[in-house]
Image (cartoon, rainbow, N blue to C red):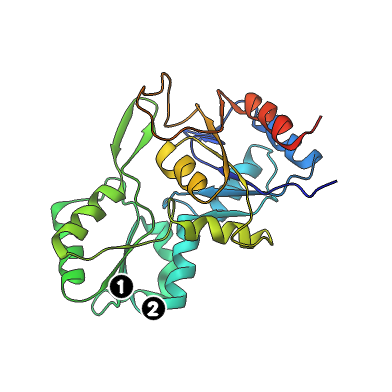
Amino acid sequence: MQPLLPFLIDFDGVINLYGKPAPFSKEFFNFIEKHKIPAFILSNSTLRTNSDIKGFLRKHNLRSDIPIMTAVDAALKYVKKNYERVSLYCIDNVKKEFEELIDNDNPQAVVVGDMVDGWSVEILNEIFRKVHNGADLVAMHMNRYWSPDENKFVLDAGSFITAIEYATEKKAALIGKPSPIYFHTALQSLGYSEETSFLMLGDDLELDIAPAQNMGGKTILILTGKTKTPLPADLHVIPDFIANDLFEAVGVLKTFYSLD
């Protein structure tokens, strides 16, 4: 029997739906465990760490031993490798992870995540001045917008980081999706090489499906999160499979891996 290809799973919009587990989450994780599918949870969130996601899974009695990485975890690893002093713009509980590296007066880099309602013209000008004066710009992710609840969308960090890039004529080092670095790190954490093919389950055509396909992976688009039907007629990114929910995703896994 051939080894199963690694399975990368997005978190928000797939497992976590506005603070609650998605329908059929337990059946989904039970299937992965039963068939020993090598899985890895990837989250582009800069509002939580892998410990926060593990806490969510334990709280809802879901399997919590699957490896997890958020954009915060990946950014911290990148910053520790490349800098001694950084200025950080994100929510307070994430700042604690970078505490020993923070130097707002003389940073080598400015690291930007999401600040929820903390964005302001003053904050943007502060980031601009630091980058304009020589600091590198590091983006935890480049999400354009996100949905704090089912009824609205709001601008995400990527929109503000793009403004800083334009003003300073400097390109941010991107850590989270759709950066190939993020996917490669997950594969390496599972013990695979960067060239290994994989299956990606996600709700975002731009951040999940397209980059996975660009790396040679197969994809499942799930319609419980950001992407809704009907899909645009001029869609340039065509997922390999589409699932309405995690129950249908399990059906795709059975077909893809030839499992019962």
Name the residue beneath numbered marker 2: 83
Residue 126 position, x and y percent, is: 17, 64
- CB of mark 1 within 8 Å of CB of mark 2? yes
**Residue 88, placed above or below residue 91:** below
Q: Secondary structure at mark 1?
A: strand
Q: Nearer the viewer, residue 9 or 115?
A: 9
Query: Relative to 174, does residue 199 appear above or below in the rendering?
Result: above
**Residue 260: x %, y % from top left:** 81, 29
| Residue 229 horizontal side relative to residue 166, left or right | right
Which residue is depicted at the point 17% across and 57% down?
A: 166
Q: Which mark is residue 248?
A: none
Identify residue type, mark 2: Tyr
On the image, the x and y values in percent for residue 177 come to 44, 51
Q: Nearer the viewer, residue 32 or 73?
A: 32
Badge 2: residue crowd in 10 Å (few <14, some 14–19, many ≥20): few
User: Marks 1 and 2, how far apart in space?
Assistant: 7 Å
Viewer-side residue, 131 vs 235? 235
Quarter of the figure with residue 100: bottom left
- Number of labelled discs? 2
- Residue that appears at 64% across and 54% down: 67
How busy is the neighbourhood of tag 1: few (under 14 within 10 Å), some, or many (20 plus)? many
Question: N-terminal of the two: label 1 or label 2?
Answer: 2
Residue 87 location, quadrant: bottom left
SS assignment at label 2? loop
Q: Which residue is mark 1?
A: 109
Q: Amino acid at mark 1?
A: Ala
The answer to whether 122 appears left or right of 207 in the picture is left
Horizontal and vertical percent position of residue 159: 25, 48
The residue shown at (31%, 45%) is 156
Quadrant for residue 252, please give it: top right
